Each structure stands twice: as structure tokens, then as C-alpha cells.
Image (cartoon, helix red, strand yellow):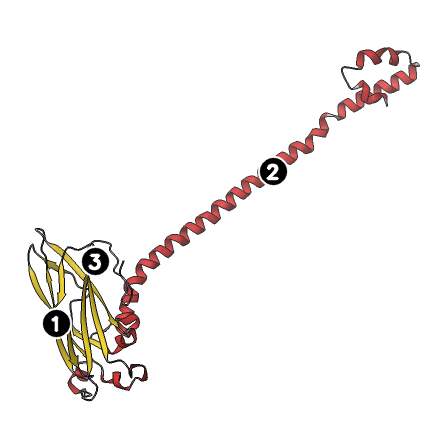
């Protein structure tokens, strides 16, 4: 009971007399135990130091792990951005090939054009639409609002573009076909889409679209009630790094 009191500096003077009053053997025993306890006190702090070192080690380990995770996340983000840029032209090419998203099928089979037979009893009205994006200062319109064709018959239409400004402007267009499902049957033999068109100041040009509707259009049950197809073009100013919208989707 006296040992804790002896270890308190404020009480030591008061207890000195009490200790000196004890028998010699008891006095020596008490002082020996006190010295032994004092020697052990600094050692009690070692676990705290070890715990502190362990905590710092764990903290450094977590920092290393977090840096590794962040590195992987950043690399994945960069990869996804690159993939998104590459996917636009690839998807556009796929749309042109399959007619997905209302994109007319690019190119044509020469033998099919020469040998296909018109479906005379199926008359289809093709209407034409022209738009310009806010990025380009052109006047752009179709030369005709509509024409009537039959599947298996070629047709020719014209658009007209004018640059009313005092500087040359390079434009590029995208297109779609409505209804979307009809895009796979709308074949263009010649057009101006996805090709840069340079117009000098105040220059005006006619742009032809030579196309036909595949005769298989008449055999598709989904096209049974389709009697009107709309071909729409939108011109944008051609700029480095600009990504055109995918065919069949709205333009913002």
C-alpha cells in the first residue's frame, strides 16, 4: 500500500518520517521494492512505442495500396476514353454496312443493280430533309421535297449548299433514314456524306444523291405499312478532332 504513495513526489516528504520509523529490515525491504518498481516503469511504455510503429507501418502500407488502386482506375479511365473515340467511326461503319440506326447501306452490288427487277405495284414516297448544325454558317436545302420510287428502281436527287460568308468553310455531313428499319434497304450508289466539302466564299454547289431501294423491301413484313421514307442530311463544320453523331440519333 505504501509503494504507490512513495512514487508520488508530492507525498514523499511526508512519508519519509514514517519510513524511517520502521524497523531496519522492513525499511530496507520497502525501499528495495520501491526501487524495483521505479526501474520497471519506463519499460511499460515500450508496448505503446511498438504499437505506434506498427500503426505507422500499416498506414504506409494502406497508402501504397491506395496509390496502386488509383493507378489502375486512372489507366482504366484513359483506356475507356480511347475506346469511346475509336468506337464512333467503327460503329458508323457498322451502321453503314448493316443499316442499323436508320443509316442507309453504303456501296452497292453492281450485278444486283443491273439485274434487279422493279416492284411496280409498290410505290414509295421518298421525302428529303436538310439541316445545318450551329457550328457551320451554310445554307443547305434539298432541291426537291419528295419523289416517288418503287423498290428495285434507281433514283437521283439533289441537295444544294451555299457558303454566304467571306471565308472558305469545310463542311462534312451525316445522315439517317426514317423509319429506321428501312435503312437496311436504302442503298446509296453515290452521295456526299462523311466526305469533306470545301466551299469558297459565296460559292454554291449542287450535291447529288443516287440511290435505290432494295427489292427485298417488299418481302419484309415489317415494311408492309411503310409507304414513306425520309432521307435527312445534317452538315457540320469540319474541325480537327470533331466527332460526328452516330447515324439515326438526334443532333445537339
Q: Secondary structure at mark 2?
A: helix
Label 3: which residue? 133
**Residue position marked by numbered label 1 in the rendering:** 144
Residue 231: name its quadrant: bottom left
**Between marks 2 and 1, how big is the CA–CA gap?**
79 Å
Determine crowd level at label 3: few under 14, some 14-19, many 20+ residues with C-alpha closer than 10 A.
Answer: some
In front of the other: 199 or 121: 121
Circle 3: element type: loop
* 134 is higher (above) or lower (below) than 40: below
The alpha-carbon separation of the residues under discs 2 and 3 comes to 60 Å
Pointer 2 or 3: first along the chain: 2
**In the figure, 43 relative to 196: above or below?**
above
Q: Position of residue 80 (x, y in %)?
A: 38, 56
Secondary structure at badge 1 equals loop
Compared with residue 242, is residue 44 higher up or lower down, i.e. above or below?
Answer: above
> Residue 154 occupies which quadrant of the picture?
bottom left
Label 1 Cα crowd, 10 Å radius (few <14 / some 14-19 / many 20+): few
Q: CA distance from mark 1 to mark 3?
A: 21 Å
Between label 2 and label 3, give the one nearer the viewer.
3
Q: Position of residue 167 (x, y in %)?
A: 9, 51
**Disc 2 designates what residue?**
55
Instruction: Tell which tag, 2 or 1, sits nearer the viewer.
Output: 1
First in sequence: mark 2 vs mark 1: 2
Q: Residue placed at 17% from the left, 81% from the top?
A: 149
Amino acid at each position: 500500500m505504501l509503494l504507490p504513495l512513495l512514487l508520488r513526489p508530492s507525498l514523499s516528504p511526508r512519508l519519509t518520517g514514517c519510513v524511517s520509523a520502521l524497523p531496519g529490515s522492513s525499511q530496507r525491504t520497502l525501499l528495495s521494492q520501491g526501487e524495483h518498481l521505479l526501474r520497471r516503469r519506463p519499460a511499460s511504455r515500450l508496448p505503446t512505442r511498438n504499437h505506434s510503429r506498427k500503426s505507422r507501418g500499416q498506414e504506409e502500407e494502406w497508402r501504397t495500396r491506395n496509390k496502386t488502386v488509383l493507378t489502375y482506375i486512372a489507366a482504366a479511365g484513359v483506356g475507356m476514353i480511347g475506346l469511346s473515340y475509336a468506337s464512333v467511326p467503327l460503329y458508323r461503319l457498322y451502321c453503314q454496312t448493316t443499316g442499323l440506326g436508320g443509316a442507309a447501306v453504303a456501296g452497292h452490288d453492281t450485278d444486283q443493280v443491273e439485274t434487279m427487277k422493279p416492284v411496280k405495284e409498290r410505290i414509295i414516297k421518298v421525302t428529303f430533309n436538310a439541316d445545318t448544325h450551329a457550328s457551320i454558317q451554310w445554307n443547305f436545302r434539298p432541291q426537291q421535297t419528295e419523289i416517288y420510287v418503287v423498290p428495285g428502281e434507281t433514283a437521283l436527287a439533289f441537295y444544294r449548299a451555299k457558303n454566304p460568308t467571306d471565308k472558305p468553310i469545310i463542311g462534312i455531313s451525316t445522315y439517317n433514314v426514317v423509319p429506321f428499319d428501312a435503312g437496311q434497304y436504302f442503298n446509296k450508289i453515290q452521295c456526299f456524306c462523311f466526305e469533306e466539302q470545301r466551299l469558297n466564299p459565296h460559292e454554291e454547289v449542287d450535291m447529288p444523291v443516287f440511290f435505290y431501294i432494295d427489292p427485298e423491301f417488299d418481302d419484309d413484313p415489317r415494311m408492309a405499312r411503310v409507304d414513306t421514307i425520309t432521307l435527312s442530311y445534317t452538315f457540320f463544320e469540319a474541325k480537327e478532332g470533331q466527332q460526328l453523331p452516330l447515324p439515326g440519333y438526334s443532333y445537339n
